[in-house]
Amino acid sequence: TKGESLLKGLQHMLSDIQKGQMTQTAEGAFELGRNLAMTPGKVVKRTPLYELIQYSPITDQVFKTPLIIFPPWINRFYILDLTPEKSFIAWAVAQGLTVFVVSWKSADASMKDVRWDDYVEGGQIDAIDTVRALLGVEGVHTIGYCVAGTTLAATLAVLAARGEKDKVASATFFTAQVDFSEAGELLHFVTEDQLEMIKGLGSEGFLDGRYMATTFNLLRGRDLIWNYVTNNYLMGQDYAPFDLLHWNSDVTNLPAGWHMDYLRDLYRDNKLVEAGAMAINGTPLDLSKVTTPTYVQAGREDHIAPAASVWKITHHFKGPIKFVLAGSGHIAGVVNPPSAGKYQYWTNNERVETIAEFVSGAAETKGSWWPDWIGWIEGVDSAKIAAKGARVPGKGKLKPLGEAPGTYVKTR
């Protein structure tokens, strides 16, 4: 190339140094609302912590019990609404669910005092109560993905302690941990030295999302770091467009105080599984009081929330639990639409104590686990009603504040 590849590689590297983040996909190839996060809907509520998005029905009849999805606030929610072909949100709407999604605000200095209690009480419980009031229903289906699943477990414990467990008809956990005794590789980042360093990084009241992105990239260094050093720095190749890596690079800031609490109380001290060791606004948490019907999905190759760690939720909840082990990892194991015909999942209807016993007696099914999940939802509550009135965004008491995907998802 007469030195052209060397020059381009240096340009790539210098650009990344200037922005403080490694490029992983072609910049400008994706845009929210244009070719990502395209499912039609409206923002129906906005708080200092989150936006609530309600999606438009496309079926004449919808399930009476609506669904609220709580994505992790360490990432953008549109991992569940990538291209139309990959969108879990669009697929759930097509199955006849009235779908709401919480889009968390990327933290800034104004959120320096936000803690664990705020995400449970002012986030998840507030959203649950909002949807119940809007649609006039007793309970809602919920999904908690990753850290939002951990918080959902706390939410269920709070509601159980207050005698309000019926507010949640079912709880689904995507690659979420409640017991961190076998939390895997991320435990290497929770030493006292690491915690002190992280504390310093959050001196302005929030933790820059680029730090978290780098941490997760280090867990897959060969694929997410050295691959780009070789191809784009040393060889000067152009970046390929990849929707998943665009999302992976779209970082979100975290409230510094909450982040430290999470690392110390959960990863280091594992307090959530100790009855009464944690509380939300004075309400002690006891996971053994949770009897909500629960669907737990884990990824067989998950390096962030190992399947053996996710499995432990079955030891702490006391209600009916269905555990599903999906092929692939933390993202691809979740975002696996039936149309893709990829991977597989395992189920086991026997009551077993360990994940090894689960696997040894499990039945394998080819393809996506999504149809299994919607079948489970129907088993919890199959009642349907007409998709009209408040089931249509903006037709109820909450007037639209803007089109999906909203404004918070676009704020750095």
Image (cartoon, rainbow, N blue to C red):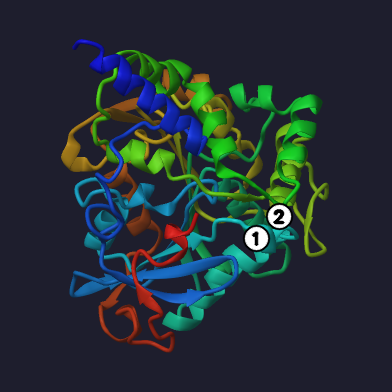
Where is residue 411 drawn, in percent x and y? 47, 59
User: Where is mark 1, residue-wise?
Assistant: 120
Does residue 69 sit above or below 318 in this rendering? below
Residues under numbered marks 1 and 2 in contact, where contact means CB atoms less than 8 Å apart = yes
**Quarter of image, res 326:** top left
Secondary structure found at label 1? helix
The answer to whether residue 136 is visible is no
Name the foreground residue: 363 vs 38. Answer: 38
Residue at horizontal 74 percent and vertical 28 percent from the top:
194
Where is residue 325 drawn, in percent x and y? 41, 31
**Which corner quadrant holds the N terminus?**
top left
Does residue 5 sit above or below 292 in this rendering? above
Does residue 264 sit above or below 112 in this rendering? above
Name the foreground residue: 339 vs 19. Answer: 19
Any mark on residue 116, and which?
2
| Number of on-image labels | 2
Q: How many neighbours does mark 2 have within 10 angstroms: few (below 14), some (14-19), or many (20 or more)? A: many
**Quarter of image, res 14:** top left
Where is residue 130 drawn, in percent x and y? 52, 77
Label 1, label 2: how far apart the Cα atoms are? 7 Å
Any mark on residue 353, and which?
none
Residue at horizontal 28 percent and vertical 29 percent from the top:
344
The answer to whether residue 308 is visible is yes
Q: How many neighbours does mark 1 have within 10 angstroms: few (below 14), some (14-19), or many (20 or more)? A: many
Does residue 52 sit above or below 380 in this rendering? below
Residue at horizontal 62 percent and vertical 49 percent from the top:
254
Inspect the image, locate mark 1, and give the three-letter code of the amino acid beneath it: Val
Inspect the image, locate mark 2, and give the three-letter code of the amino acid beneath it: Trp
Residue at horizontal 81 percent and vertical 27 percent from the top:
192
Where is residue 234 drawn, in percent x and y? 35, 13
